[in-house]
């Protein structure tokens, strides 16, 4: 008893010592000639980054990383895991001491109450000439960039949309300080930009908390200008979150902003729509994703197979066939999709097409017994089930399985049959060498022979193996 207690305590001690830090990102230092200083960066990589070495990722650039990096990385990870947004590389720009106002605010026309302000254009120059090339060199990136900023950072975001609109593809502007310079950005600059821009595309999600005065007024003015002038290719939304204050609004805005930006990409929504409405729900999905984001739609073959299984089980084989056809279009090397497509085609009387689909499934998986059996049935019909009566008699009888179940093997009109106390009679398909196939359970059944009579049986399914002895 004493020894047991000692060992238990030692085990607890070992567990308490086996501690590892939980890491959500990495800090880097980038020396900037443009800003004439070293800048700290916080970078978070997607979970799949190390495993999928051939894959590239869009990049989210985040301002005020010292306060926003943790909740933003958690939000992106959560949404990406649930396939609301794509996985992204997060690059957070930490403010250098005392220089936040300098780096995030544009210059002013009139008297400037903050003498260090006005360096926003220089910060954009730093991003374009130094930060972007460094990120592209260090990491596997796609040419799709999102910018998120709060307060002065939100002002910086709107300034970038108006004056550097070729640098980012989408924007989240959280409680932007549009009061800056007596609302000059929305009173003159935004209107001039929006009315003269020939082609504006991308996404903007802008929010305001319970702020009032010129802050709130600037938001409404910009929203009105966007309503009148943005055009159909620039997707934007403005939300006033009165239950939030200036400090609490970033997290909620980040989540809703990213979901808005990637609403057309959102696989979770498409998955549900595919199940409910069939292929019509995703008719333009791939083209829309490519057009808006410039990278492929995130088709998921298992979700698509599940979407096809539901109408198939309800007897809606035309709807199921269309879904399985879509799976084979998107995943031409997926044998199970070809097999299910063939089953739908056969039920609908399209035997020639079904044979072609099964041949493709067997080309991909030569040992696929279900596809082998289905193809033989199509080629030979009911004759494929026939075996000589003398041979059938070798197998007839009851078999006690090692899982406590009894199976019955019988023969009717030259066909060997399988049943249990819980199941209906089902034909066994002969494969040769005392081996048969049970379609409903995808099971290979092999009889153990002795002196021309079966003495036992072995059953192999995709999930299990069992043996039985003849009673």
Image: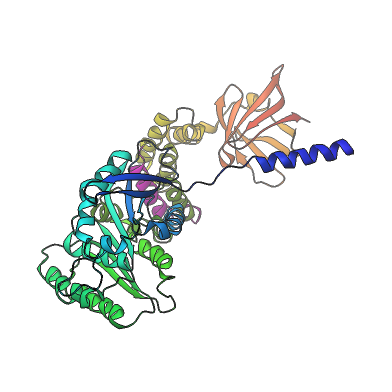
The residue positioned 69% from the left and 18% from the top of the image is 452
Q: How many marks overall?
A: 0
Q: Which corner quadrant of the image does residue 69 belong to? A: bottom left
Taking the spot 41% from the left edge, 41% from the top edge, the residue there is 49
Q: Position of residue 314 (x, y in %)?
A: 49, 56
The front one of 257 and 268 is 257
Please state the horizontal and vertical placement of residue 70, each as a whole percent of the image. Answer: 45, 56
Q: Which quadrant: the C terminus?
A: top right
Q: Is residue 330 magenta?
A: yes
Task: Read off the magenta span.
Answer: 312-332
Question: Visible in this render: residue 89?
Answer: no
Judging depth in this view, the residue of 2 and 334 nearest the camera is 2
Most common SS among magenta residues: helix
Which residue sits at x=64%, y=43%? 425
- Residue 243's place in the image compared with 332, above or below, is below
Residue 337: percent from left, percent from top = 42, 42
């Amino acid at each position: 008893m004493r020894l047991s207690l000692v060992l238990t305590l030692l085990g607890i001690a070992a567990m308490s010592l086996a501690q590892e830090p939980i890491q959500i990102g990495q800090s880097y230092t980038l020396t900037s000639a443009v800003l004439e200083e070293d800048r700290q960066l916080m970078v978070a990589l997607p979970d799949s980054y190390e495993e999928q070495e051939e894959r590239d990722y869009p990049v989210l650039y985040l301002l005020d990383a010292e306060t926003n990096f943790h909740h933003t990385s958690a939000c992106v990870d959560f949404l990406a895991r649930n396939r609301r947004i794509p996985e992204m590389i997060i690059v957070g720009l930490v403010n250098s001491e005392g220089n936040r106002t300098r780096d995030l605010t544009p210059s002013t026309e009139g008297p400037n109450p903050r003498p260090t302000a006005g360096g926003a254009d220089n910060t954009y120059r730093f991003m374009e000439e130094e930060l972007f090339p460094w990120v592209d060199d260090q990491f596997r990136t796609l040419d799709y960039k999102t910018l998120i900023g709060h307060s002065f950072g939100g002002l910086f975001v709107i300034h970038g949309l108006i004056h550097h609109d070729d640098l980012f593809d989408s924007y989240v502007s959280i409680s932007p300080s549009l009061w800056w310079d007596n609302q000059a950005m929305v009173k003159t600059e935004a209107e001039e930009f929006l009315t003269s821009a020939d082609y504006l595309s991308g996404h903007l999600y802008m929010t305001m908390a319970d702020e009032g005065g010129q802050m709130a007024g600037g938001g409404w003015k910009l929203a009105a200008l966007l309503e009148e002038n943005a055009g159909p290719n620039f997707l934007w939304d403005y939300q006033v979150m009165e239950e939030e204050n200036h400090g609490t609004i970033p997290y909620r805005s980040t989540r809703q902003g990213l979901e808005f930006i990637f609403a057309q990409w959102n696989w979770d929504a498409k998955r549900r729509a595919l199940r409910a409405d069939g292929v019509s729900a995703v008719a333009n999905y791939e083209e829309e994703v490519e057009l808006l984001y410039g990278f492929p739609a995130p088709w998921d073959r298992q979700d698509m197979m599940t979407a096809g299984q539901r109408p198939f089980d309800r007897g809606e084989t035309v709807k199921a066939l269309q879904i399985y056809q879509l799976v084979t279009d998107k995943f031409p090397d997926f044998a199970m999709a070809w097999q299910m497509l063939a089953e739908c085609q056969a039920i609908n009387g399209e035997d020639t097409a079904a044979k072609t689909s099964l041949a493709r499934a067997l080309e991909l998986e030569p040992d696929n017994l279900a596809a082998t059996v289905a193809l033989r049935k199509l080629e030979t019909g009911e004759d494929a089930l026939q075996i000589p009566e003398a041979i059938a008699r070798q197998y007839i009888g009851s078999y006690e399985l090692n899982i406590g179940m009894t199976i019955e093997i019988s023969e009717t009109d030259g066909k060997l049959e399988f049943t249990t106390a819980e199941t209906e009679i089902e034909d066994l398909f002969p494969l040769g060498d005392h081996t048969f196939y049970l379609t409903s359970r995808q099971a290979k059944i092999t009889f153990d022979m002795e002196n021309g009579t079966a003495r036992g049986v072995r059953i192999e399914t995709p999930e299990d193996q069992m043996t039985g002895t003849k009673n």
